[in-house]
Amino acid sequence: MVTYVQLSTTAKMPLVGLGTWQSPAGKVTAAVMAAIDAGYHHFDCAYVYQNEKEVGEGIHQKIKEGVVKREDLLSLSCTFYEKPLVKGACQKTLADLKLDYLDLYLMHWPLGFKAGDELFPKDDKGMSIPSNTDILQTWEAMEELVDAGLVKSIGISNFNHEQIERILNKPGLKYKPANNQIECHPYLTQEKLIEYCQSKGIAVTAYCPLGSPDRPWAKPEDPSLLDDPRIKEIAAKHNKTPAQVLLRFQIQRNVIAIPKSITPQRIVENLKVFDFELTKKEMATILSFNRNWRICAMSMSKTHKEYPFHAEY
């Protein structure tokens, strides 16, 4: 059974990676080491997660132990900087991760924030303060990273199809996006956007594939995917956990999933999704749960000219 997606750059991207968002700095090194021991070769990091140094420690330690080779790992990171700052941001990530190159580097959002010490600068109304950077200029800076050998592939995250179209139609485009990382789970199935990306040769990665149960802003009335009785019922039929069903759902759509965990047992479990298959009926049932419910709506940027979620897809 194929356990990876081939990118347009011919690189192979494992279908399951370890997400590190919300993983506390003190615990993420051990999580990364446990994941490599379990057979993970794909790690999703980002400067804004503020834990790349610790992720790097875990990777470095396992390479040193000879458990894994650098060329067998796919490490990716995300940035959202103005054009002149992109290279420096990438170099900082490389230094923190103790790597010479990244396999994939993504523009984290299609919207830029005012440069400065704050990661998410806000005005007195609590709305984000935008930068005037255009996504096409940032994309040129991303292309320069490939030419400089700092990254092998470049991609995007949270872009709608109109924004992707603008990159694909950019005069003088050197490298097209290899990947679009988007929020995706049964309550936000993203069928149109996935179909669009895949038709353009852009691989899709689902973040929050388990519904991000430990997100800090969860409200008691929010729906919980892992507790959904309909998911539990499908899981029981296959003798699997609800999390495994949610991951399998993405894999069968050829969508990469990056569940986050710092629990060794769950890290191992999340990789055991290649030994069963959901039926066509089960896939259709899970797709029918869609309610366009977003966990990461980035509401503080709703007024930004590049806010991606006003578009249908």
Image (spheres, rainbow, N blue to C red):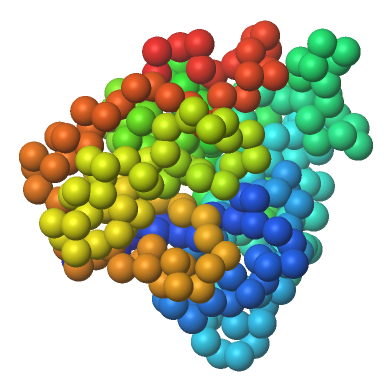
Residue found at x 21% / y 28%:
288
Total numbered badges shown on the rendered structure: 0
In the image, 50 versus 4, the foreground residue is 50
Q: Point out residue 305 in the picture as x, y percentages from the top left corner.
A: 65, 10
Q: Is residue 64 above or below residue 178?
A: below
Residue 147 position within the rendered picture, expressed as x and y whole percent measured from the top left:
63, 49
Q: Is residue 154 visible?
A: no
Q: Is residue 263 left or right of residue 248?
A: right
Q: Residue at x 74, y 67 (%)?
A: 26
The answer to whether residue 295 shows anywhere in this view is yes
Give the farthest residue toward the front.
220
Work out which residue is located at the far right of the displayed protein and give it. Answer: 117
- Residue 14 screen position, x and y as percent: 39, 61
Residue at point 59%, 42% (across, down): 215
Vertical arrangement, residue 18 with respect to residue 110, above or below: below
Q: Report the front residue among 276 and 202.
A: 276
Q: Tell me: residue 158, above or below residue 74.
A: above
Compared across the picture, whether 242 is left or right of 294 comes to left
Quadrant for residue 54, please give it: bottom right
Q: Nearer the viewer, residue 90 or 225?
A: 225
Q: Residue at the location (63% across, 13% down)?
A: 302
Which quadrant, please, contains the C terminus? Answer: top left
Residue 180 spot, x, y in % from top left: 46, 37
The image quadrant where one finds the N terminus is: bottom left
Compared to residue 75, the image places residue 229 above or below, namely above
Left or right: residue 70 versus residue 235 is right
